Amino acid sequence: LAQAVVHGGRIIQILGNFDDCLRIARELAENFPVSLVNSINPYRIEGQKTAAFEVVDVLGDAPDIHALPVGNAGNITAYWKGYREYVADGPASHTPRMFGFQAAGAAPLVLGHDVNDPET
């Protein structure tokens, strides 16, 4: 949120969970001249993959293991894409083993179905 505040963004709190917030954000993007840049934006993975580039640049190679939280799997998808591209282009010699973890109360990938009232 710090980036939004620094650039003049207005932060509002809603009563609800991530899905409620996403519904409101979609409505705002449909009715106002703003872009929604979260998981439904087709360019999100392309931008976020650069985090894997930064990891390799700092460490000198990809780590052996990369573990991170997973909601809808956008983060892990982006990192994986970045690592694969860096292996193909030469800065990394290998891709890491990737482990994604979901909160027990919000684990649609683990459960195989939507979670109506997720708890994290």
Image (tube, rainbow, N blue to C red):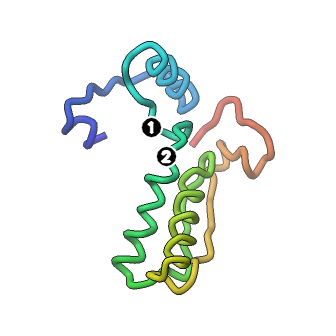
The type of residue carrying mark 1 is: Val
Please give the name of the residue rendered at 54% of the width and 57% of the height, measured from the top-left corner: 78
Q: Position of residue 49 (x, y in %)?
A: 48, 60
As rendered, which of 19 and 3 lies closer to the eye? Answer: 3
Q: Position of residue 115 (x, y in %)?
A: 71, 36
Cα gap from disc 1 to disc 2, whole angstroms:
6 Å
Please give the name of the residue rendered at 42% of the width and 69% of the height, measured from the top-left corner: 53
Q: Position of residue 86 (x, y in %)?
A: 49, 74
Please give the name of the residue rendered at 54% of the width and 41% of the height, measured from the top-left corner: 42
Q: Secondary structure at mark 1?
A: loop
Q: Secondary structure at mark 2?
A: helix
The answer to whether 84 is drawn above or below residue 17 in the figure is below
Quarter location, residue 1? top left
Cβ–Cβ under 8 Å for marks 1 and 2: yes
Q: Which residue is mark 1?
A: 37
Q: Which residue is mark 2?
A: 44
Categorize mark 1 by other alpha carbons within 10 Å: few (<14), some (14-19), many (20+): few
The answer to whether 74 is drawn above or below residue 36 in the figure is below
- 81 horizontally vs 114: left or right: left
Quarter location, residue 40? top right
The answer to whether 104 is drawn above or below residue 22 in the figure is below
As rendered, which of 84 and 69 lies closer to the eye? Answer: 84
Quarter location, residue 3? top left
- 33 horizontally vs 26: left or right: left
